[in-house]
Image (cartoon, helix red, strand yellow):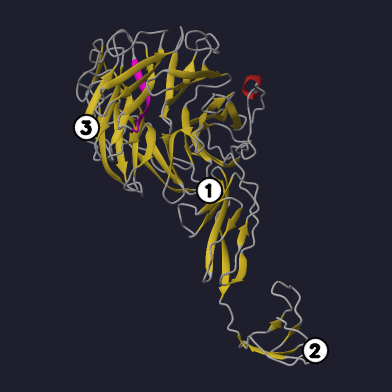
Amino acid sequence: MRKHLFYLLLLGVVFTNAQVLPQVEWAKNLGSTGGDEGWGIANTLDGGYIAIGNTYMVDGDVTANYGNYDYWVAKLDSSGNIEWTKNYGGTNSDQARKVVPTPDGGYILAGMTDSNNIDVSGTHGEYWYEGEWYGDYQDDYWIVKIDSAGNIEWQKTLGGNHRELLNDIKVTANGGYIISGTSNSNSGDVTDSHQSDGGYDMDAWVVNLDSQGNIVWQKAFGGYDGSSRFESIEQTSDGGYIAGGSTSAIGGDAPPLKGIADLWVVKMGQTGNIEWSKTFGGSRGQVAHSVKQLPNNGYIVSGVSSSADGDVSNGVDNLNTRWVIKLDDDGAIEWERSYHGMWGAVTLEITSDGNFVLGDMIQQDANLMKIDVASGEIIWSKSFGGSGRDMIYGMVLTPDGGFVTVGGSNSNDGDIPGNHGDYDILVAKLSPDCLVPELTIDTTHTICVGEELTLTADAEAELISWYDAAEAETPIFTGTEFELPELTETTSYWVEAANGVCKTGRTEIIITVNPLPVLEAETTYAICSGNEASLYASSPSNVIFWYANEDDTEYLYHGNLFVTEVLTENTTY
């Protein structure tokens, strides 16, 4: 792994007591001796992962190929071991970009194809440009629905007579799909383009599908004398959509340009109507690779800029730099910041604490960087890899609060073992950025009915939560000391300590509640002054203790028959 110091990255890096730098738990090189690349990854219901990329050789982990590049999907267990693999495509080039879990337990695969055989059907048109024939078919969006075992349920090609390049797909709230990319068609499925059919320039193209892959609506976004594309899209809390990419177009849907190409963010309604459209950047080029709505509203946009003016306050002129913008609900800039030494903020995920993590490459190593959402300050930066070139193209948060990434690597050392030759699909699991607390507590207690008890948990943790059931969602108390209600029978409680998403797991505390013993005794005796009193009490299977005062801790005698000393006045025992 390359070792570098970047003074600009180290400024403002702050760890809280509960946050630590993630560590590589495992890394896997998957693929063949050919040049393979991984683009998408997702969690699976069984605690494993599913990764998608592109392969064209048949060796190593790849057992089949239809010709040229195929979609290649690998189902992995929780440790990154292959459970099954499948390839999808035709005899021409099929380029995968995303894999997304579907509500039925299957997956949607998305990318583009210029095949029209084997797994692929319905591809649009021949490709002619300036009177020359370039091939029977040019890239369409290609959407493939598979079940949990990788079997194809349906497939759809979307596009026109010319070229469509898919960048993103998400599942919508109603079980359909929203897709973004770019197109230079004005035919077939593409009916409202600003471009001539097959022209040099391209529009951003958004398609909404139902759960069976049928087009609900489609819309081209752009202008004239320049190209536009959307690299990221997701549904927003109001049922609309937010998309991010770039434009160099003039007029049409495109706002006035600030540079050669601007970072472009568009907020849409539920049917693709533009609610607002904003461009950002300086005098050179900018593009958004990812845009996400924040939990408390507003948006985070990550990408790259080569400007050092305009909206870009700390960029480097003519040098591509990771650029992040925080927008309010209406698209106004709240803060923006450049992070030097970066490749371009390819992927972005919102973390459970409301901050976010960027993934891409820094100085040939894969890199994750966590950013404070309120200020843009770096919380931590983690690079990993080997002596080759290691890239991140996709990332998801894992259920344990860690991270799993996918990309490409030609390393065979450092963090990255097992290269098959040339570039492989790199899948890496990183630990959570927090410490699991150590929890100390007595797990068994015995009391009598009506006796008070306070449970005390000892842990250096942000939160200690108490539950009345092992699977309860809502705690009944939070804090270190839990004063129990009056118990009449043996009862269990559960406690866990947490630093953010890093939790101990729930520990059961059992409180055995014994019934009060039955005591039989005469409560008054009469004797003559100067005599002893013989006091008798019984309780089956129990020992009787006699005390001089109600609150005494030391007893006078134990046994059923207690003979007092000589008494000269009224006395209570």
Expressed as whole percent of the image width and height from the top left, the position of residue 351 reads: 50, 36
Image coords of residue 7 (percent x, y): 66, 20
* Residue 413 is one of the magenta-drawn residues: no
Q: Is residue 335 left or right of residue 454?
A: left
Mark 2 or 3: in front is 2
Residue 163 visible at all: no
Residue drawn at (37%, 35%), measured in percent from left and top?
Answer: 70
Q: CA distance from mark 2 to mark 3?
A: 103 Å
Circle number at residue 79: 1
Q: Which residue is mark 3?
A: 215
State the extent of the magenta-drawn residues as a range: 228-237
For the residue pair 535 and 265, the one nearer the viewer reads as 535
Q: Quadrant of the N terminus?
A: top right
Label 1 SS:
loop
User: Label 2, on which residue?
Assistant: 566
Q: Amino acid at mark 3?
A: Ile
Q: 57 and 189: which one is in front?
A: 189
Circles 2 and 3 in contact, beta carbons < 8 Å: no
Q: Is residue 229 magenta?
A: yes
Badge 3 marks a residue whose secondary structure is strand
Please, what is the three-letter code of the amino acid marked with disc 2? Val
First reached walking from the N terminus: tag 2 or tag 1: 1
Residue occupying the point 46% across, 57% down: 471
Cα gap from disc 3 to disc 1, whole angstroms: 38 Å
For the stretch drawn in magenta, the main secondary structure is strand
Asked whether residue 522 appears in the rendered view, the answer is: yes
Out of 363 and 13, give the one closest to the viewer.
13
> Which label's residue is closer to the chain start, 3 or 1?
1
User: Residue 129 appears in which quarter of the rendering?
Assistant: top left
At numbered mark 2, what does the secondary structure look like: helix, strand or loop?
A: loop
Circle 1 crowding by C-alpha within 10 Å: few under 14, some 14–19, many from 20: some
